[in-house]
Image (cartoon, rainbow, N blue to C red):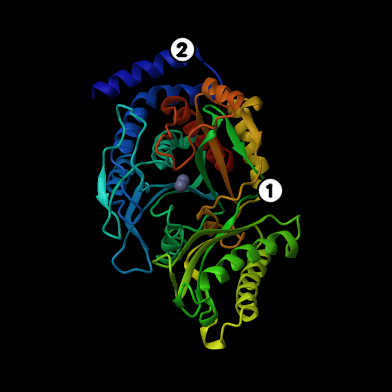
Amino acid sequence: MRTLVLSAIILLSSSLAFPTGAQQSLDALIAREINSLVETYKMLHAAPELSHREEKTATFFAGQLRALGYTVTERMGKFDRPEWVGYGVVAVIKNGDGPTVLVRADMDALPVEEKTGLAYASKVRTKNDAGQEVGVMHACGHDVHMTAMLGTAKILSELKNQWRGTLVLVGQPAEETIDGARAMLKDGLYTRFPKPDYAIALHDSPDFAAGTISITPGYALASSTNVDIKILGVGGHGSRPESTKDPIVLAAQVVLGLQTIVSRENSPLDPAVITVGSFHGGTRYNIIPDEVNLQLTVRAYKEDVRQRLLVAIERVTIGIAIAAGIPAERAPIVKVSETEVTTATYNNPELTERIASTLAKALGQENVVKGSPIMSSEDFGYLSLDQQIPTTYFFIGASDGTKLKQSKAAGVPMPSLHSALFAPVPETTLRTGVKAMTSAVLELMKK
Ligand SMILES: [Zn+2]
Ligand SMILES: [Zn+2]
């Protein structure tokens, strides 16, 4: 109750200071909430949970939304592995006829041991799926996303006279493992709940100053596909190569051969990446092993480009094995993952322009930049159902502006997302997140 009385006083004094204008009243509402939002953020930051294990986070998140008057469903999401519980949260609030707008925040953290030294740093340790002990950290800032959503949810529940339609807030599990959005769709996100006319999401970024936004029309993030290649040889003594088929040399040729797919087979106008991130084979100096295992990540924007890359990877790999005289029954095995895959994030240009100009009005034109597409990946794109539903996804700056300038001048980048040192500036980042998301929703649902 104490906070309620205090809030009322702050609201009153803010509205006296800013008697007119929707922006001012939104600022005042955010000012009233910001201390409690920063507290929520620090609490979530100190208690991260890995993908597929967001139990406590989701319970807290759902409880907060329920207390705000939303109709909340918990434990949403069907994963391929039956032992993984879907901890998805769907919170719906209906406010008469009008569009259905979905806003998504992701909830999972990463197996990273935090090294920020902040007072609210995570000290959480747990065992990962492989049974290894790991530190856990919100190193991608999904705690920022959840907190910004809670602030947005509260303000929109109070501003019901300014919007109409159905608002669907989604707490998504397992973004880092890129299977959470699909798990929620599989569990009826668009059949058990109102199917959205628009879906939007934000992500924090250390590449921009807190208080600013970067938004990219069209393709914003790439698709990502994991590929395993098993190169089979014929092992033997390291001193007798003539009696073997050396899979290490073969795998080395494959790694180099794959580089020509992007540089020689793909149009330079279609961005693509093939990275071999892992190369494992052999046990001893003088033993030629029987096999080498490679792990690849493949990135592209367009689906036809992705398909061509995958076909070429298999063709090049098998071709090199044939050239080396590997017998047909020992041909390489190329396996494209069906689960460790995600679609590209395509920002519907019309919707993106509309949101960008809304954000520019809310935050100042100088604080909203048109960003460049990147080859990182996300699973938010699935919510567009292959671009049938207009979606947009924007970045909110999370870095201290002065430090960011210094880092650019010195040529030393700020700690990136997933870094043990990633430390968003809480207050300004959250203010901007809440203001951006609230303004975007009000634009799409305005009366
Ligand atoms: Zn991440
Ligand atoms: Zn993330």
Q: What SS does tag 2 mark? A: helix
**What residue sits 30% from the left and 18% below the top?**
6
- Residue 408 image point, x, y percent: 60, 27
Q: Amino acid at mark 1?
A: Pro
Q: Quadrant of the C terminus?
A: top right
Residue drawn where x is 26% and y is 42% of the image:
124
Q: Quadrant of residue 8?
A: top left
* Classed neighbour count for the residue bearing mark 1: other residues with Cα under 10 Å, few (<14), some (14–19), many (≥20): some
- Is there any visible trace of residue 335 in the rendered image? no
Question: Which residue was labeled with disc 2?
Answer: 16
The CA span between labels 1 and 2 is 39 Å
- The type of residue carrying mark 2 is Leu
- The CB of the residue at mark 2 lies under 8 Å from ligand 2: no
Viewport quadrant of the N terminus: top left
Q: Which mark is residue 349?
A: 1
Q: Is residue 259 left or right of residue 136?
A: right
Earlier in the chain: of badge 1 and badge 2, it is 2
